[in-house]
């Protein structure tokens, strides 16, 4: 498995991107008061407001433990409502060689991008940290104003080559339960012999120790772009989400999974647990395939 990765989370906001950007640009000191469950302390070490070149630090809660990180603000673009933060010190750098964030706001959407390189293949993807960020985002937005639509994107560096990985999901999907027995219990194609546009497929899988089920319609397969689009049409996910659609794509040494969803209520969690199942499955498939 490669060591580099990228996680992207986009959340629909009813407060408007400008208000959210302003919190992190000029009123960042308010964040511990707004989101005390996630942020203990914020400090600007150089400068009065967050600006390019500022050094800032955070104390935050993750899995019940107080953590620390210090950032260099690499860029701020008020026109694009974008801030780039580079971790230069703290707990995250015990696990990752680098860990960088980008915050951006566009119309009614706020997007967080995390780019990182793990120190070892056994280092977990930073889904728990992303969960913290999303909780903080919700607190800032305030529950009554939070939108219901969202998008999660995970890109992982692969050593097997994108063609091999795409082929597993295109022509050899029946092998996935054997390759990933911890996460996938059963796979079935209900219409057709291989995964192709119009196929109906179903999965039984483990999530947080429970057996779950979903049925999907394959909306598109593009062998040239090494892309598959899967639409959930039945199963446990639709008890929480009005829709939940996946896109799998492979390019050069990277595989990317995109989940687009709409929550049924504002209290519905983002599907980070499900994304974790997907990333664990990717690792098992990568370990199974011959290295390029």
Image (cartoon, helix red, strand yellow):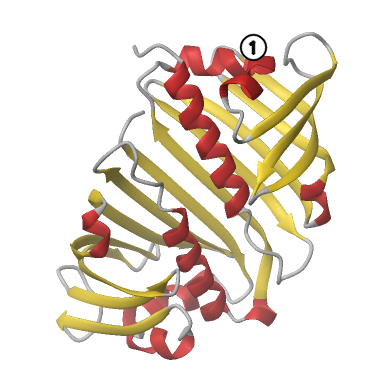
Residue 210 visible at all: yes
How crowded is the residue under tag 1: few (<14 C-alpha within 10 Å), some, or many (20+)?
some
Relative height, residue 11 to residue 137 (above, below)? above
Q: What residue appears at the point 79 percent right and 21 percent down from the top-left corner?
A: 188
- Location of residue 140 in the rendering, given as x and y in whole percent from the top left corner: 51, 80
Q: Is residue 127 above or below residue 38?
A: above
Residue 180 location, x and y as percent? 58, 27
How many numbered callouts? 1
SS for callout 1: loop
Q: Residue at x 71, y 65 (%)?
A: 268
User: Residue 117's image quarter?
Assistant: top left
**Mark 1 sits on what residue?**
172
- Quarter of the image with the C terminus is top left
The image shows residue 12, relative to residue 170, as above or below, that is below
* Left or right position of 238 against 286: right
Q: Is residue 104 above or below residue 158?
A: below
Q: Nearer the viewer, residue 194 or 220?
A: 194
Q: Is residue 199 visible?
A: no
- The residue at the point 40 percent across, 86 percent down is 32
Q: Residue 169 at what x, y percent from top left?
A: 62, 19
Q: Position of residue 190 (x, y in %)?
A: 86, 19
Q: Is residue 30 left or right of residue 212?
A: left
Q: Nearer the viewer, residue 14 or 206?
A: 206
- Of the pair 281 and 229, the residue shown nearer to us: 281
Quarter of the image for the N terminus: give it. top left
């Amino acid at each position: 498995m490669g060591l580099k990765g990228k996680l992207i989370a986009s959340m629909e906001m009813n407060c408007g991107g400008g208000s959210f950007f302003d919190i992190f640009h000029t009123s960042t000191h308010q964040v511990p008061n707004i989101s005390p469950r996630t942020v203990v302390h914020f400090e600007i070490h150089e400068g009065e407001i967050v600006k390019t070149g500022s050094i800032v630090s955070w104390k935050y809660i993750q899995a019940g433990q107080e953590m620390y990180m210090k950032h260099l603000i690499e860029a701020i673009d008020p026109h694009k409502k974008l801030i780039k933060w580079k971790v230069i010190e703290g707990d995250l750098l015990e696990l990752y060689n680098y860990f960088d964030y980008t915050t951006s706001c566009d119309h009614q959407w706020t997007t967080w991008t995390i780019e990182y390189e793990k120190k070892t293949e056994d280092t977990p993807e930073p889904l728990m940290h992303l969960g913290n960020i999303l909780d903080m985002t919700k607190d800032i937005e305030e529950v009554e104003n939070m939108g219901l639509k969202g998008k999660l994107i995970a890109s992982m560096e692969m050593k097997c080559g994108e063609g091999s990985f795409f082929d597993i999901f295109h022509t050899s999907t029946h092998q996935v339960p054997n390759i990933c027995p911890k996460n996938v219990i059963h796979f079935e194609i209900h219409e057709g012999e291989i995964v192709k546009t119009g196929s109906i497929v179903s999965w039984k899988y483990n999530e947080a120790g429970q057996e779950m089920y979903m049925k999907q319609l394959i909306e598109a397969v593009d062998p040239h772009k090494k892309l598959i689009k899967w639409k959930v049409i039945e199963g446990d996910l639709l008890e929480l989400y009005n829709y939940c659609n996946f896109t799998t794509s492979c390019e050069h040494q990277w595989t990317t999974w995109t989940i687009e969803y709409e929550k049924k209520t504002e209290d519905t969690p983002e599907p980070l647990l499900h994304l974790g199942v997907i990333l664990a499955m990717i690792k098992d498939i990568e370990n199974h395939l011959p290295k390029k």
